[in-house]
Amino acid sequence: MSEDKMKLEGDGKSIDLPIHSGTVGPKVIDIRSLYSQTGMFTYDPGYTSTGSCESKITYIDGEAGILLYRGYPIAQLAEKSNFMEVCYLLMYGELPSKEEAAKFEHDITYHTMLHEQLNKFFSGFRRDAHPMAIMVGVVGALAAFYHDSTDINDPHQRIIASYRLIAKMPTIAAMAHKYSTGQPFVYPKNELSYAGNFLNMMFAVPCEEYKVNPVLENAMDLIFTLHADHEQNASTSTVRLAGSSGANPFACIAAGIASLWGPAHGGANEACLNMLGEIGTVDRIPEFIRRAKDKSDPFRLMGFGHRVYKNFDPRATVLKKAADQVLKELKVSDPLFDVAKKLEEMAVEDPYFKEKKLYPNVDFYSGIILKAMGFPTSMFTVLFALARTVGWVSQWNEMVADPVQKIGRPRQLYTGEPERDFVPMGKR
Ligand code: SDX
């Protein structure tokens, strides 16, 4: 795989490091021999310039605002495909044939039920627990029930665990919501689509027939597709690092959910809607833009900026259009959508945001649609985790099967005390 070499000189040493090229995107400098040849580590807090693995799943060109799932542009998949097809594509690398798609959807459908005893887990939580806390707990607990799919060295068990996770996340998410409302859990219905089944479990009540609104069903499917995977983001890297120790898939995905919860990551959709609510009206936008630029103020514009995208996040572009459509079709007028559109307009024209290349990201518009669809704000990151599960399991499977992969164990730059002797209490 290696072609050119990079010469590294310094500290009285000179070494050549192999350079590897991918299909598209930046080349990499292979530094695996750096420590043995120089006695030095690299230093890259936040991994701003570090590639952690080789992957064939998702490619992002941040400067050009490009996102590809197995080579297919996200805008084409959003327009022409559906979430079940995208799940198959991410897991297996190719779009499914008609028969493959039907079998995959059947297999996922028939894993949507939870072991009945898991229902008891929910009664241990406070009714006002954040649903993400419930997701971390219940998904991790799946390892206590599905022992026949925890052996990561068995490819068949890896696939079953992957299917169980993709299939059961909507059931667990809907149960977390129902638990918070005091309404009874709603069981999966096999005749419904993945998105339709989720909406039914979320919003149906035993007292009347729930009819899935096709506008909501299509919007839900689109939102799942847009959030499905995103290269080596914080939560995916968490799943890979957890998996590198040989931990079972349920534990790894629970770790990914925990990482996604942070407001700098998947928690930004909830934080963004709360921020739009705090801004309230268009005339207060300048005050918040000023605060976002003020270094002494910890306030940031939630839903803006991205480690990789230094242009528009292509997912935000699709979501903005979808928000417009969903609000119109549902005949919902939401003043926060007007605030969001005006905020985007003013921020992207502001020299500070231009210079730092801060654009709306996937979390900026998703909250508007989800609010219009009837989801409580606290469920927004749960929906992100639900959708991202297929990306996490696809990346986890790729990692486990990678012959090069080994346990992740970064080093450090130590700036603490050098060795010193213990000081007895009398001499402190
Ligand atoms: C997701 O990685 C992924 O792919 C994630 C994700 C996925 O699909 O998995 O795309 C999902 O997490 C999207 C991001 C959602 N988070 C937010 O919207 C939170 C607000 N955004 C920021 O906190 C920030 O932009 C990050 C965390 C997204 C990116 O942070 P970086 O890459 O570490 O950039 P940085 O914090 O170093 O910021 C660079 C500069 C800084 O100013 P200086 O110190 O250089 O003077 O830009 C400023 C920051 O202060 N800045 C912002 C800002 N984001 C960055 N200033 C105001 N408002 C913001 N939102």
Image (spheres, grey):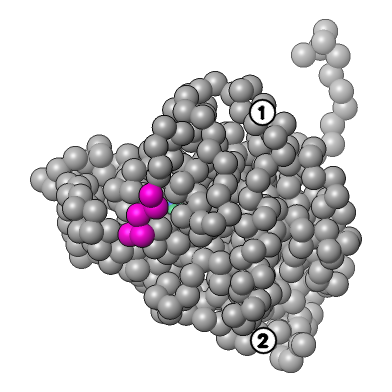
Badge 2 amino acid: Ser
Real-space CA distance between mark 2 and mark 1, rounded to the nearest whole angstrom: 48 Å
Q: Is residue 333 left or right of residue 5?
A: left
Q: Is residue 153 left or right of residue 106?
A: right
Residue 31 at least partly seen: yes
Q: Nearer the viewer, mark 2 or mark 1?
A: 1
Q: Is residue 213 magenta?
A: yes
Of residue 118 and residue 2, the one placed in the foreground of this image is 118
The span shown in magenta is 211-215
Q: Provide the residue designation for mark 1.
A: 121
Q: Provide the residue designation for mark 2.
A: 21
> Residue 266 at x, y = what percent?
49, 50
- Residue 273 position (above or below residue 218): above
Instruction: Assign ligand 1 to one image quadrant.
Output: bottom left
Q: Is residue 366 left or right of residue 201?
A: left
Residue under the point 33% across and 59% down: 215
- Give the residue at the far top of this rendering: 426
Of residue 418 and residue 40, the one placed in the foreground of this image is 40
Q: Earlier in the sequence, mark 2 or mark 1?
A: 2
